[in-house]
């Protein structure tokens, strides 16, 4: 990816992600929460907490997040083996769990086992 392409991607993230985060935490979350959730993770090196919107699937006590174009995105690498504790906002509910990311061909998959 060119530097200019990455810059456009970063600008889009800095513009759209805060709006989506606000929406997903608000009483209006139903407009987007069937497909989008928030994940909060801690950077392995920085120790800083980050929250981003992600597409997800919920099945029982497991949330699956597919990361398209994983080479362009860095966040999921914080969840590679052995994984990490995360916080989620799914359909207006706060959940916690343990997330593990794995790379598969052209995507990465993050599986979160939700705490009961």
Image (cartoon, rainbow, N blue to C red):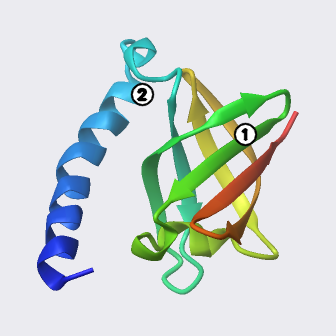
Seen from the viewer's position, the closer of residues 58 and 28 is 58
Seen from the viewer's position, the closer of residues 46 and 67 is 67
Q: Residue at x 75, y 52 (%)?
A: 111
Dot 1 falls on a residue whose secondary structure is strand
- Splitting the image into 4 quarters, where does residue 67 fall? bottom right
Seen from the viewer's position, the closer of residues 60 and 49 is 60
Quadrant where the image shows the C terminus: top right
Number of numbered discs visible in the structure rendering: 2
Label at residue 25: 2
Above or below — where is 63 with respect to 108? above
Left/right of residue 91 with respect to residue 100 in the rendered view: left
Dot 2 falls on a residue whose secondary structure is helix
Q: Position of residue 94 (x, y in %)?
A: 62, 31
Tell me which label, 1 or 2, sits earlier in the chain.
Answer: 2
Q: Position of residue 85 (x, y in %)?
A: 72, 59
Label at residue 63: 1
Q: Residue at x 42, y 18 (%)?
A: 29
Callouts 1 and 2 close, C-beta under 8 Å: no
């Amino acid at each position: 990816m060119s530097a200019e392409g990455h810059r456009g991607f970063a600008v889009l993230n800095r513009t759209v992600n805060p709006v989506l985060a606000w929406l997903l935490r608000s009483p209006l979350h139903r407009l987007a929460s069937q497909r989008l959730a928030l994940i909060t993770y801690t950077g392995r090196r920085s120790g800083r907490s980050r929250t981003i919107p992600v597409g997800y699937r919920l099945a029982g006590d497991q949330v699956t997040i597919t990361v398209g174009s994983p080479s362009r995105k860095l966040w999921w690498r914080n969840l590679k083996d052995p994984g990490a504790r995360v916080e989620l906002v799914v359909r207006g509910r706060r959940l916690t769990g343990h997330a593990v990311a794995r790379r598969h061909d052209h995507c990465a998959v993050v599986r979160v086992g939700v705490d009961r």
